[in-house]
Image (cartoon, grey):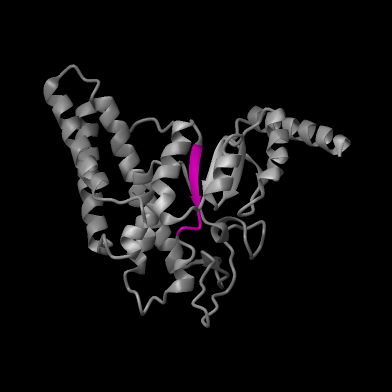
Amino acid sequence: MELFKRIYVQLLKAIDNYAKDKNWPEIFYAFNNKDWAPPEDVWKVKLVKEANVKAWEQQGRPDTIREVAKFCDLCLIHPPAEQIPSIVAKLKEEKKEVGFHNYALGLFYRMRLKQNPIIPSIYRFLWGFWFWATGANVQADEFYTISFGQPYNPFDGIIPEPSIGDASGVAFPGPKGPRPTLRFEWMREGRDDFRYIDLLQRLIIQTKKSKSQKIRIKAEEAESFLKKIRDSISINLNDYWQGKKRWWPLTQYDLYRKEIASRIIELQRILKFKDIKMD
């Protein structure tokens, strides 16, 4: 075991240094990607930290989330819906990066599209506006990333199983290449919503630095608009599942996106450049 630990640490260091030399995007190393890992498995992440590289862990139960969060840089969580706000706030307070896994996946197991036509709105909401409102850093879906299908092609997936309403894959083999599923399109729309918001927020930061009060007012108006949207969103998903909050109709997303795009163009024009560096 001691020999394994030494080799493991040296191997992680070598991989991490190679990635940095190549200037690749930041990499987090998993020490466990199973739900509800026992606290005694924490020794694995200690090896990752000993190698001085960043570690992530996937957890679903609040007690083990708190246990492994002491050591992880990124925690992918799936706690009960009512505990999302408090756990996210606590992890961010501790300077941890926070992510979610599989919050949308179960929809296809519990619902049928013909029985619940609002499901496209739910997916777009979870992958876009809701994700933005939580302040989390990552939104992951196992069936989107690593499970089933061709392991070297993340866009491949299992064939839908009508008997259980399963359409887990995001794309299926077609005669001219992968064919994206509706589910994949809904997820992509949500990510695009997030990108629009993110760009507007970056422009607001730039515009608020202006010495002109008139220009700063434009930034504050855009900021107030985003705050109004944020205040209308509940991070506690039970509020939606139990009917305390209503899902937005699909038309609402496009209206919000149109308004966000208009404000982006306005601030870009004020700042007198066409784009900002996305770093």
In the picture, the quarter occupied by the C terminus is top left
Q: Which residue is pictured at 59% across the width and 37% down the height?
A: 72
Q: Nearer the viewer, residue 187 or 116?
A: 116
Q: Is residue 203 above or below residue 191?
A: above
Farthest-out residue, front: 63
Task: Determine whether, in the image, residue 99 is placed left or right of residue 152.
Answer: left
Residue at the spot x=66%, y=27% of the render?
A: 21
Viewer-side residue, 106 vs 254: 106
Q: How many marks?
A: 0
Q: Position of residue 27 (x, y in %)?
A: 61, 37
Indicate whether 160 appears above or below 82: below
Residue at x-position 13% and y-position 21%: 213
Residue 210: within the magenta? Answer: no
Residue that lies at the very extreme toward the left in this rendered image? 214
Q: Main secondary structure of the magenta part?
A: strand
Give the image location of residue 243, x and y in percent.
Answer: 28, 65
Q: Position of residue 193 (x, y in %)?
A: 33, 50
The residue that appears at 53% across and 67% down in the rendered structure is: 168
Please give the range of residues in magenta: 97-103
Of residues 155 and 11, the one drawn nearer to the viewer in this rendering: 11
Extreme-bottom residue of the structure: 163
| Displayed quadrant of residue 125 | bottom left
Residue 56: x and y in percent read: 60, 41
Asked which quadrant contains residue 22, the reply is top right
